[in-house]
Amino acid sequence: MLKRKAFSYLENWKKTKKNECLLIKGARQIGKTFIVREFAEKNYRSFIEINFEKNPNLKTIFDENLDVKTLKEEISLRLPNINFIQNQTLLFLDEIQACPQARTALKFLAEQNEFDVIATGSLLGINYKEISSIPVGYERQYEMHALDFEEFLWAIGINENIISSLKSNFENKTPVKEETNKLMQKYLRQFMIIGGMPAVINKFLETNNYNIVHDEQEKIMNDYLNDIAKYAPTSDKPKARNCYLSIPRQLAKENTKFKFSEVEKKGTSRKYANALDWLRDANLIRYCYNCIPPDFPLATYVRQEQFRIYTNDIGLLIYMYGYQMKEAVLTDSLKGSAKGGIYENLIADFFVKKGYPLYYFKRDDSSSEVEFLIEKDCSVVPVEVKAKKGSTSSLDTLLKKDDTKFGYKLIDGNIGYAGKKITLPHYMAMFL
């Protein structure tokens, strides 16, 4: 059983909630359903689960009156052998995007507060217009992701004391023992080719076979492409698919921004922008926006027309390059421009799972470029990513600004610092 940070979030919600349901958002197959079932087993005497995609006939429960008394009667009628025990029941509404009226009903369920309600949704961003009334103030939203690198380390049996020791190195800026550092870099490369999807990690733990890992990733990729074919607007289906499949090419060329010409010769934003937005709303991709100037607050200086795109899981990106890429990454023998883009997506994976919005910095009139910008203590922290090591002239320039307190250089190496520049091995992005 995989240990997930989301479980602690659910426990805190249960302790602190007041007349509110919990809505867990996130891409398909990241473990939302599993974590709710595990949480219910350990915290409730009665568990009632409704999956609107597996059982679309149950949507009729929410067709008429949405008062709690009627809903309990309708649920009891359609689901025999269930029991509503006051304050000891969890009602689980899975894939709630398939039943917009159930989303509206969350308000009334929260107001009555007879039992706890958790809803999950994979494609919530694509059908929000169908909801008659979003229950503002009555639902707490939580965005869940695939496993992050720390959770991956837990899964493969790395002792938490080792992770705590590494965090101490990070905080004190002291180099990691070379043997430990090399081992962590090996685990990081494993994480890159396996990714954070629970089903993929479980297959790896069961078999230690990368062929089987690749097959499991193929199933997830096919499910994602089927979602595009099923749910994207008719005019955007081929566009969304082609945009998604272009990401490995975009990153391999180290483009300073997403180029529609990589999707189709003479492709334009006008033609493909809606398809990209659909992919974002379906949680399949993440936008990373250029900020000029790179000043606090970053959202003020976003250039909406200049952005990069990253996949929602580093393992799926490596899958998209083909099986041989797994060997190249695992043995650290990858060469060429693709390597830089892969490591960018890796750090984007770290940041998204820590809740950071993604920003970067690239001037139009120079080659000055820093891969990521994050905010801390009302200041901008530049983060430059190097696949191996290399110079950091762009980062050095930003660090000369008086309002830039410090910046990070992420490398295939060890900890060091000089002035305001802190050098870290890539895996320590989990502590930023």
Image (cartoon, helix red, strand yellow):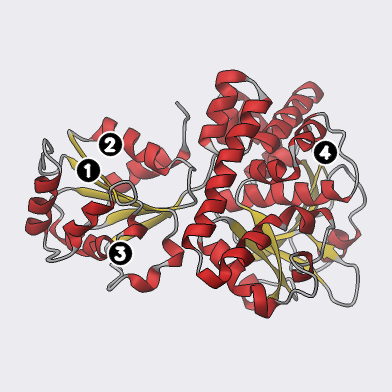
Mark 1 burial class by Cα count in 10 Å: few <14, some 14-19, many 20+: many
Mark 1 or mark 4, which is nearer the start of the sequence? 1
Task: Give the CA distance from mark 4 to mark 1.
Answer: 46 Å
Instruction: Tell me residue 429's x, y (percent).
Output: 68, 44
Q: Secondary structure at mark 4?
A: loop
Mark 2 burial class by Cα count in 10 Å: few <14, some 14-19, many 20+: many
Q: Nearer the viewer, mark 4 or mark 2?
A: 2
Mark 2 lies on residue: 40
Q: Residue 412 got which mark?
A: 4
Mark 1 lies on residue: 90
Most extreme residue toward the bottom is 270
Mark 1 touching mark 2, by CB under 8 A?
yes
Whether residue 405 is visible here, answered yes or no, is yes
Q: Residue at x 80, y 70 (%)?
A: 265
Front in this rendered view, residue 352 or 46: 46
Q: Nearer the viewer, mark 3 or mark 4?
A: 3
User: Which kind of residue does numbered mark 2 sit on?
Assistant: Ala
Q: Residue at x 83, y 38 (%)?
A: 412
Mark 3 lies on residue: 100
